[in-house]
Image (cartoon, rainbow, N blue to C red):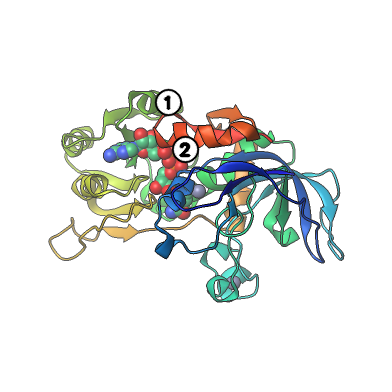
Amino acid sequence: MKAVQYQRVGESPVVVEVPRPEPGPGQVLLQVTAAGMCHSDIGVMSRPAEVLPFELPLTLGHEGVGTVAALGAGVRGVSEGESVAVYGPWGCGVCRNCAQGKENYCTRAGELGIRPPGLGAPGAMAEYLLVDDVRHLVPLDGLDPVQAAPLTDAGLTPYHAIKRSLPKLVGGSTAVVIGAGGLGHLAVQILRATTGARVIALDVADARLELARKVGAHDVARSDESAPERIRELTDGLGADVVLDFVGIAPTVKLAAQSVAIEGDITIVGIAGAPLPVGFGLLPHEVSVASPYWGSRAELIEVLDLARSGALRAHVETFGLEETPEVYERFHAGEITGRAVIVP
Ligand code: NAD
Ligand code: ZN
Ligand code: ZN
């Protein structure tokens, strides 16, 4: 089968021929129908060899949807031909967090060598994907695979990030979305669908601001040094109750700190890792800061339900498997608005 692999540090991914996997006991083989392209893939491919947490080659793709092609011994609960989304942050399934469906916070995955598909295990940018356990699958129940693929991460991650702040996102509140890309444009829609907040989206690219407005942002503004003042203007000087940073670089975490209200939340989702000084006098009083990772399996079910109700619509551009290396180049150059989805 064909697969898109990152083979050598610093080099572009390539399309290669690899053996089609066979499902062992407990495993499920999917024929991939759609795989989303995430900025975290670029993060992974920008890392020097010393800090790459897994071995190469790696088949990319951690947003996967497919139809069940074959079941390993003992698998029950899905049937051949069924369309399913893959819950990506695989855990051990046994620890306390996994028992609550929070496999994204599995305490034993590292020690057991369990990694998400596309981020250590072979991923979804291939004709077939091997899934380790049927519990990682959520039936699509009528959702379009191309729409559903981005929801498994670009939808689930903002959904989880927003959920922690729901009590603050009452009528009259304000949420700021920094970075209206793959995750951010879905964050705007999740905020609109699940909260009473006024939504302000910030970006550095006009196309992303246009998209943010199209999908429901009340206001959009350029993400620059004037943005905190603009946000204060729009909030009667109070600042934003919740700031979601989908970039995480020094200028955006600074912007978040300057825009947040007293008792507000700053949630850093972007993985750039810029530090945010926290301490008395460094932020408005009682601001809470979090850096969440992905989301729970139950939340993925909620996101897909929300999409089925018509509240979420990923803005996608589709490509064939052979085009993937070139699409990564375009994505890296900032030429993709919304989400690129590979259809093998
Ligand atoms: P993307 O490239 O689709 O979107 C990023 C957006 O940020 C783009 O629209 C870009 O124009 C905008 N941007 C760049 N610089 C900016 C600035 N200074 N101010 C405002 N906007 C700016 O990327 P994505 O796939 O949506 O991923 C977003 C981030 O989230 C990445 O860092 C990715 O690695 C991370 N991520 C984190 C998790 C998690 O679990 N924490 C999960 C998925 C992705
Ligand atoms: Zn991702
Ligand atoms: Zn676990």
User: Residue at (32%, 49%) from the top-left corner?
Assistant: 248
The residue carrying pointer 2 sits among few (fewer than 14), some (14 to 19) or many (20 or more) residues within 10 Å by Cα, namely many
Where is mark 2, residue-wise? Answer: 182
Q: Is mark 2 on a helix, strand or loop?
A: helix
Point out residue 249 in the picture as x, y percentages from the top left corner: 28, 48
Choose top left, top right, bottom left or bottom right for residue 304. top right
Q: In which quarter of the image is ligand 3?
A: bottom right
Against 97, is 158 above or below?
above
Quadrant of the rendered image containing residue 211: top left
Residue 184 can be seen, yes or no: no
Amino acid carrying label 1: it is Leu
In the image, what residue occupies the spot 59% across and 71% down? 113
- Label of residue 211 in the image: 1
Query: How far across and down, in percent of the image, does residue 111 sit?
Result: 55, 76
Residue 286 screen position, x and y as percent: 23, 61
Quarter of the image that includes the C terminus:
top right
Q: Nearer the viewer, mark 2 or mark 1?
A: 2
Q: Does the numbered disc 2 mark a residue whose Cβ is under 8 Å from ligand 1?
A: yes
Mark 2: which amino acid? Gly
Instruction: Give the left or right position of residue 320, taking residue 185 as reference.
Output: right
